[in-house]
Amino acid sequence: MADETGALPPRDAMEFDVVIVGAGPAGLSAAIRIKQLAAESGKEVSVVVIEKGSEVGAHILSGAVIDPVGLNRLLPDWKERGAPVTTSVSEDRFLVLGPSGELRLPNFLMPPLMSNHGNYIVSLGALCKWLGDQAADLGVEIYPGFAAAELLFDERGSVVGVATGDMGVGRHGEPKDSFVRGMELRGKYTLVGEGARGSLSKQLIARFGLAEGCCPQKYGIGLKELWEVRPDRHRPGLVQHSFGWPLDTRTGGGSFLYHYGDNLVSVGFVVHLNYENPYLSPYDEFQRFKTHPAIRDVFEGGKRIGYGARAITEGGWQSLPKLVFPGGALLGCAAGMVNVPRIKGSHNAMLSGIAAAEAAVAAIGAGRAHDPLDAYDSAVRNGEIGRDLKRVRNAKPLWSRFGTVAGVALGGADMWLNTIIPGIG
């Protein structure tokens, strides 16, 4: 409780080598890799992960197609360990929808990077829960149910950790009888992997000018539902992407159906947030989409068992901010590492966590703390993540400028050129 002057009591503090915000693919990959490197060197590196969800995976929208490159790098024996990654993609479909019909695009016309051969359909929530178990087995401290509410700075302005929010606060901000002060989690480095438009990420980008010299970030909204469908409507391993109706040709967006697990179908609808029609409702357009003749039969007799929505960073390579600041780094979607044409970001999130872990452990081993992890920024831009984002860097701008019909065609041609002649354009 506050004293007679209104001052709040000091927070208790815990000290770690690395503090990680967010138990998503990026944060958990960083935690696991740090512990792996510590074990290899025979040194102890303490790691804590805080997660706002009630449990690890609670804030992850399930149903995704993942490129296993990050998982292979992090835990090469993930199959033997029992990872919940079992439904491999068996069929790719690309549809252009009209009001009453559809046109299937031949797969041979699609740029090779759009192929999902070798990828897996998963519950991303279940995968994160499993990654959390792997991290805990390695000695990572994970605290779900605690949101990072405040950044902590030292006298030089470097980030030295985060504080969780106070509990038992009244509607007007006054402490109630149940008031409990938040906890300070301090570390030599703080890795922020809280997802798109996270509150701490926005503060860090503004405070340290991380977005200077790059294009403004672009966003979309993704709506997703998880359905249990009739067995005769289920096609395990089918990945179907579509664009067109019910959106007009000046409104960017697309949709997908992923069949996996025990009669499960994840259906999603993405709308780019540069749409011009002020009356457009993404949610209502999603519901209209499910009535299309090419879509509705899948759900007839089925049951919706989950739903949600999230912001998606869509700026890509041009909008990637500086990734490091004094005392830490931005990971995954906090920095905007989604490959928009592929509708995939988990692989880059995991790779970013691995790269950040390696930079942090090297810095700690050299006796450093609270300085920028420049090696991480370089590893992302010059490594697999940079190559993945560079080759699709023109797809979203072309779509936004020329609309769905011409933009998608030009974007596809550009991706083909970047496949044949890497780095062109």
Image (tube, rainbow, N blue to C red):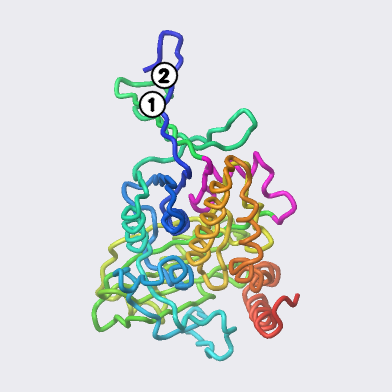
The label number, if any, that marks residue 181 in the structure image = 1
Q: Residues within 10 Å of mark 2 (few under 14, many from 20)?
A: few
Q: Is residue 247 above or below residue 142?
A: below
Q: Is residue 70 left or right of residue 86?
A: right
Q: Is residue 393 above or below residue 11?
A: below
Q: Residue at x 43, y 53 (%)?
A: 42
- Residue 410 visible in the displayed image: yes
Quadrant of res 155: top right
Q: Quadrant of the C terminus?
A: bottom right
Are dots 1 and 2 in contact, CB under 8 Å?
Answer: yes
Residue 259: horizontal and vertical position, in percent? 35, 77
User: Which residue in the protein does label 2 denote?
Assistant: 9
Residue 98: horizontal and vertical position, in percent? 51, 80
Q: Secondary structure at mark 1?
A: loop
Q: Is residue 301 magenta?
A: no
Q: Residues within 10 Å of mark 1 (few under 14, many from 20)?
A: many
